[in-house]
Image: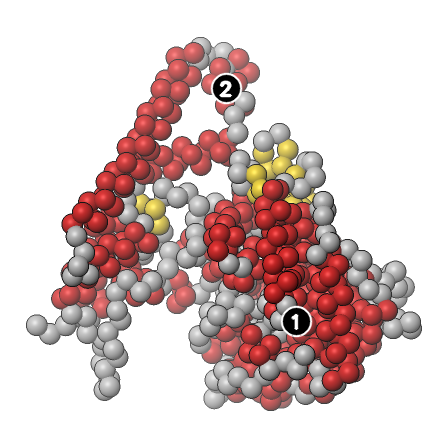
Amino acid sequence: MIGMTISRAAQAAGVGVETVRFYERKGLIEQPPKPAASGFRSYPDETIERIRFIRQAQELGFSLREVRELLELRADPEADAADVRARATAKLDDVNEKMRQLQRIGQALEALIASCPGHGELGCCSIMEALEGLDMMACTRAFRATVAVAAGVVIASTAGAPSIRAADDVHYGPDTVDIAAHWAARATLANAVMFSGLGEPLSISMSTADDILKHAGYIARPPMPDMATVGAVYAAGSPALKQTPDFSDLQTLRWGPASFDRTLEPAAQAWALIKITSPAFHLNFHDDKADRRVALMMLPQARAQAEVLAERLLTGPGLFAARSSDGTFAEPRAHDQAVVLWGVSNLILAATSEREDYWHTAWRELVDAGDYRELSDRALAAVEQLPPNTPRDQALAIEALGRYALATNDAQRREKALTLARRHANALTQVRNVSLSDAALAVYGLVEAGRLLRDDGFAKAAATAFETGLLPKWDDRLGAFRTDEPVSYTPSITAAVVAALNAMRWHGSGDLAKEANRLYPGFLETVLVDARLQLASPLPLVPARYREGWPDTAFAHPALPTPEKAGLAPVFAGEVVHENGTWRVSDRRFRTADAMFLANMLVMPHEGQADTFLPANRLESLDR
């Protein structure tokens, strides 16, 4: 029989086209080869039968991982029916346990209802009194999960889209958490440097624009988006939108300028520069010309931020410091020196890569790395002059020094950078009884030191720090790591934890890597969604073409309010606090350096490389 087009195959299997594409992405079905001549891919009967099998298994409550195992058994000629029976029995036991949980909840509700007078003041209501004594976050999650599994319910995000089982009740799962992280970071960067107006306006010349368009793949000049493009970014501002947002009209996404703190901070410039010069960020979900154009429009912004660091934020003694709108300098901080070194080194790495994708080609052809080598040398001298003295800053300095070592063409300075990195890594091995941020970033710094210096001792120290310094702070009921009382999270604290978990997920081993993978999705959901550190959903920024084949929950949690409903940009708040069993936003203000630090740690790997970790291909050729 002649095969079917994807639309006919989807119809025959009883699913949507997006579901077929989703199964292809997950490797559950094979995508037919594209015809040599023009035409459509042809789906055989065997694929349609396989889709039906997957769908029916999901409806019985099997996860995609379990479905994959069933498919492998199905294809194994030596497999025994007992294997399938064992899996089905385990699933039935799981369902029965959920049913028992549901029955207990039902009995508890009956008792509450029976004790309620049914009239009078709300303060006398026995149901409300009982509920006020419960951990509602935990109860709500357990209740929704129990109901979903017991009833065999699946939630479809859009018509024909693949379903997400409500049984897990953590929409950030292992298959989608990095996608959600990418879009949370993307919304934050876009608002900071292109939508809000939170910075000094930047005019891009027509010749530069034409170069950008050429590298993005344009032949003719299209209409350019009317964005509030900035060079230097301001320190802070209120993310309240001035008017009802219309994402097709970017002028409606501006923030109120009266709320802006116009201080120019080195860390704010540097963290923005780091994200702009991070390749995987600009290669994921940048499949067409429009997205590539926007990505490359950030190139002149990176130049402007480097120029601000060199000409306006570098003090006479050779240290970088914040500068207020009246021109006065604040006291230099060790943190700023390290982050500036990271940012400028990242810029040089972007401009010297030999990779041939659109992004690296544009950076290599449009940016002269030699223009920034003196600035990177000054930043190295600043890190040496004002060395970091906290585990947090020592870890960031290790990453910055590593990037400088990869970027410099000066052998003596490279050796100095590696020597300093080893000194800070040795200090991290002695860290004990410190704050959550320090404990988490010690893990990250030691992992990177081990990779940079080819020293397994630092990798082992990282594993010990994770197991004895960080994991004991985890609170299952809270769904997060405990800080000082009351528990509070800023973007900076969150970034530190994300860095540690990703370090273990991708560069750890054994049970510790598994534990990091287990904790990461739930932690991110607790802090970004339950606590509302992420003020609004980034979903309106996700083009429809990328949502095909994925549920909307892969890009943004459904509990997040839309920017229109919240009246807020989809960016990070300044702080959230957990008190009396509930989370609340204690500081709604957007603080650029902190927010961009988190945006840099929230990464999605591309071809095995994540932006917050030293590039493996460069490390291989590093002369140590």
Up-down relation of residue 196 to residue 85 (above or below)? below
* Residue 382 or residue 297, whichever sits in front: 382
Compare residues 473 and 51 and report the one nearer the observer.
473
Identity of the amino acid at label 2?
Ala
Q: Which residue is mark 1?
A: 453
Q: Is the residue marked by circle 1 packed among few (<14), some (14-19), or many (20+) residues within 10 Å?
A: some
Residue 154 percent location from the top left of the image: 31, 45
Residue farthest to the right, as pictured: 316
Inspect the image, locate mark 1, and give the three-letter code of the amino acid beneath it: Leu
Q: Is residue 208 above or below residue 615?
A: below
Give x and y (percent) for residue 578: 62, 37
Image vertical order of residue 168 relative to residue 208, above or below: above
5, above or below 51, in the image? below
Dot 1: element: helix
Q: How many marks?
A: 2
Q: Which residue is mark 2?
A: 130
Question: Hey, which residue is sitting farthest front in the picture?
Answer: 457
Q: Provide the secondary structure element on which disc 2 rests.
A: helix
